[in-house]
Image: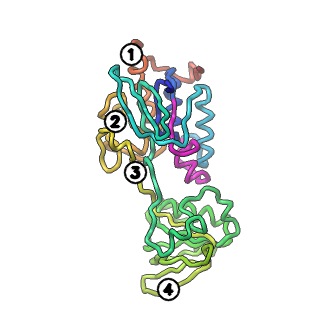
Amino acid sequence: MLNTDICIIGAGPIGLFAAFEAGLLKMRCHLIDVLTQVGGQLSEIYPHKPIYDIPGYPEIKGQELVDKLMEQIKPFHPGFTLGERVEVMTQNPDGSLIIKTNDQTEVHCQVLVIAGGLGCFEPRKPDIDRLIEFEGKGVNYIVKDPEIFRDREIILAGGGDSALDWTIYLANTAARVTLVHRGDTFRGAPDSVEKIFKLAKEGKIDLILQSNVIALNGKERLQSVSISARDNSLTTLKAHHFIPLFGLSPKLGPIAEWGLEIDKSAIEVKPVDFSTNIERTYAIGDINTYPGKLKLILCGFHEAALMAQSAFKYVYPDKKISFKYTTVYGVPTF
């Protein structure tokens, strides 16, 4: 059995920063993630997507941010269990916790921090003829490596930030990019919407509004996409890849059975320290909810800092916490 001070479920950016904040207070951390790599959604879905609201970085790619966070926590030597899903939490008589994964890995800890982002997630799949048939053969729900789309005919569908962002990004990579949207207005950031219409006006992308992709065509691989307009006219376009971007369906998985207070697939916490209704258990990042909650990486970092200050009393019950500025005392090492 592994022993640590804090067990963190989720090795995304919030979980990684939580390990840093805990390390500043001399608390050891072990992180568990169902994915086989650290970084959470940033590494799995958005590694090349630019992020604009990280302090000190006018723009930083998702994977670059993960790499910086890993560099930041290196002095604290956190442990990692990757590719395993947490299934069971039990509480010992002394209050400490035992966390068990689907591969029977067990971690004994004084504090549990749930930083699982959206939890176990899967892409929302639209009702399109032969969609499942072409998965892995031209249908992509996420963009891991934009280079596979270089000089190819790409069709994306969706009206949110992901559809807009990847259309803009792939406009400089693919041979041709077409964005199909069922409406004529978008849900994404105004700046991204403006860029989309500008690219369409300049002829750098094709923009098809008030339309839906209704069928995929091909033999062994995707060859074309059928699109139905609001007036019921039908268009068929050549396509090497089809990328439907309609968001993710979050699922808490086994965590939902632990007796935590849950509201719409999010864990309710106290905003003073992001503790849950179960003692010694905290939830930070997109997986939690409280009045005024904003699902931003920036806010998750703030939550991680306050969580660590609160968790200290369980790890060191006989010590009084002393807040120190890293500008004065530097970063301690283990």
Residue 334 against residue 212 in the figure, above or below: above
Q: Which of the numbered marks, if any, corresponds to residue 271?
A: 2
- Which of pointers 1 and 4 lies earlier in the amino acid sequence? 4
Mark 1, other Cα within 10 Å: few <14 / some 14–19 / many ≥20 = few
Residue 314 against residue 249 in the figure, above or below: above
Quarter of the rendering containing residue 274: top left
- Per the rendered image, the range of residues in magenta is 30-54
Does residue 199 appear in the picture of this structure?
Answer: no
The alpha-carbon separation of the residues under discs 1 and 3 comes to 35 Å
Mark 2, other Cα within 10 Å: few <14 / some 14–19 / many ≥20 = some
State the colouring used for the structure image.
rainbow
Task: Indicate which label's residue lies in the foreground, 3 or 2.
Answer: 3
- Which of pointers 2 and 4 lies earlier in the amino acid sequence? 4
Q: Which of the numbered marks, if any, corresponds to residue 234?
A: 4
Q: Which of the numbered marks, if any, corresponds to residue 317?
A: 1
Q: Which of the numbered marks, if any, corresponds to residue 71?
A: none
Q: What secondary structure is found at the residue carrying circle 4?
A: strand
Amino acid type, residue under disc 3 in the picture: Lys
Q: Are marks 1 and 4 in contact (CB under 8 Å)?
A: no
Q: What secondary structure is found at the residue carrying circle 3?
A: strand
Residue at the disc numbered 3: 251
The alpha-carbon separation of the residues under discs 1 and 4 comes to 69 Å
Task: Indicate which label's residue lies in the foreground, 4 or 3.
Answer: 3
- Which of pointers 3 and 2 lies earlier in the amino acid sequence? 3
